[in-house]
Amino acid sequence: MEQTTIDLTGVVKRFGAVHALDGVTLGIGPGVTGLLGPNGAGKTTMMRIAATVLAPDGGTVRLLDRDPTDADDRVEIRRRLGYLPQEPGFYQRFTAFEFVDYVAILKEMSDRRSRHEEVRRVLEIAGLGDVANRKVKALSGGMRRRLAFAQALLRDPGLLLLDEPTAGLDPEQRLRFRELVSNLPNRPAVLLSTHVTEDVTALCERVIVVAGGTVRFDGSTDALSATAQGRVWVAEAADARAVLSWRMGDGRHRHIGDPPAGAELTTPTVDDAYLLMVGGARDGREMAA
Amino acid sequence: MSWHVQAPTIDAYISGRIEDAEAFSVEAHVLACSRCREALSARDDTDRHERIWVALRDEIDRPRIGMAERALTAVGIREDIARLLAATPMLRASWLAAVAATLGFAVLASRAAGHDALPFLALAPLIPLAGVAVAFGKPADPAWELGLSTPTGGFTLMLIRSTAVFAVSVILAAVAAVALPDAGWSAAAWLLPALALTVLTLAVSSTSLTSTTAASLVGGAWVVVVAVADRLADRPLTMFGPGAQLVFAVITAMAVVILLARHTSFERPTRI
């Protein structure tokens, strides 16, 4: 396996005046990497560039040690890629089986028997074996999400890109999804974008925080929590000096920001660190993106 | 147990070249004799079993196939290609019915217009245009982005679907043309314009315009040009005469060149 599966160097992408990505440089290797950021931070743009479906305006991209601008290399990359788009569209008239079969055909599986075996395999993994012959329009939202996930597993990809895979899932489905990702056969490199911090703490060996089209943090989840060390405190009342504060279940208030002297400091979580990191970054440009 | 399956018999059994009676006695024996069971399984071809099992399972568990796909495979199209085409709106029964009705009206209009084929000739080239407009790309194809991330979901899929849409349009229009009042050369004069407009639409959609916008622009321009030509020309159907056909051939060729030169924009667009 390659040492890095996604290599971005100074990647820039603009949509009109908006800089969706503003010079992103990073290398992503094996294991599960989380891409965390607020809506409009550039996560989806990054995922699309990594999925070869969008060309950047500047910078260089290497995927699975190949060059996506080269036609032959691009085909090789796509052969080893599994992609769950943020808004996967379906052909509503197809059954679940037909839809995955359709993607399998696009993934060059022309032999019907082995293709059908593979379609059944991924439907089983996603827990959809029983509804394989049900029309997509008759599936629940959670089932559709799993259907989109199932197709990404076709042909055991070396790189699995999941854009907001847990959006719209209920807590139980979310746990099931975590189980699926941690038990994937052949352990592909996974890049998972989300704005849910629990997904990241539960699944990811490494987390990248993006906001405003730039990388704000890159490291382990523990290291992310540690960035808020000494900046989270608990008090009886609300405090206007905090960047953010909220009333907890026990009636006390949790604050993040620069604590006043003598404040009762507490152990920061990934949530605290994330909020602190992107809380100050919410300028107009980012909201527009 | 005194009797055991002999090596030549095992060979015959494994290869399947064995009399039924002998095969039954081998099977009855190995149920009771672990030594022969092991001898047999050591020689067995598990790949072959796997293949048989997969084939069997596929026959039993074969999913029902939709009507469009059955029709496509019935006319000799490969089942995997048929699946790719089944997601094309134009190949649905409702579309085909709408197209047939439109062509029918165009034929009636041509008859009503005093044996003038112009209404039909002007309309027929727009049929594949409408089909191609929704055959690929955003926003027409809901799974387009997903397809782009696969080896064949970009340019190849676009070509497969567009070709199918064009072929079906040509067949329907050709059937309708038979009913034209004056079925001379003009009954086929729509064919080259149809090809030119279709390829031109594909070429235009290689820009940042969507396929639907591209088709609207090309179709709109076509209607204007036909109407203006009909007013200005002194002879009827100048737009479809030999000189014009040459122009359509040139447009087609140029559009093909543009399409091939810009095929990357169907593979890895700068906007999605």
Image (spheres, rainbow, N blue to C red):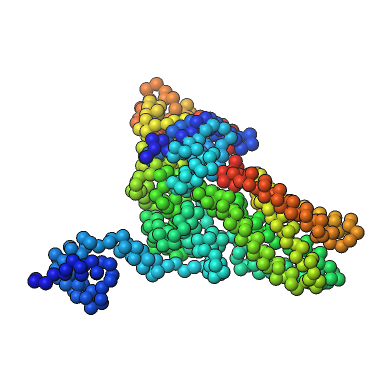
Q: Is A36 rendered above or below residue B64?
A: above
Query: Is B233 positioned to the left or the right of A220 in the image?
Result: right
Q: Residue furthest bottom?
A: B21
Image quarter of the C terminus of chain B: top right
**Residue at 41%, 42% in the rendered image:** A190
Side (left or right) of B181 relative to B263: right
> Is residue A232 or residue A72 the one in the foreground?
A72
**Quick one: quadrant of the N terminus of chain B?**
bottom left
Image quadrant where residue B39 sits: bottom left
Residue in the picture at 75% in, 54% down = B248
The one nearer the camera, A122 or A156, is: A156
Who's the residue at 23% across and 78% down the image?
B21
Asked if residue A36 shows in the view, the reply is no
Q: How many marks?
A: 0
Whole-percent x, y for residue A186 in the image: 34, 47
- Image x and y of residue A137, in percent: 51, 61
Residue A69: where, in percent of width, then height? 54, 39
Residue lying at the far top of the rendered structure: A261
The residue furthest right is: B234
Residue B190 shown left or right of residue A285 in the figure: right
On screen, residue B222 versus residue B98, left or right, reads right
Quadrant of the rendered structure where residue A224 is? top left
Q: Can residue A53 be seen by looking at this rendering? A: yes
Q: Is residue A138 above or below residue A243?
A: below
Instruction: Find residue B52 and report its horizontal and vertical position in percent.
Output: 34, 66
- Comparing A145 with A123, the one in front is A123
Q: Residue furthest front?
A: B8
Question: Which residue is rendered at x = 34% and y = 49% of the image?
Answer: A185
Quarter of the figure with residue B234: bottom right
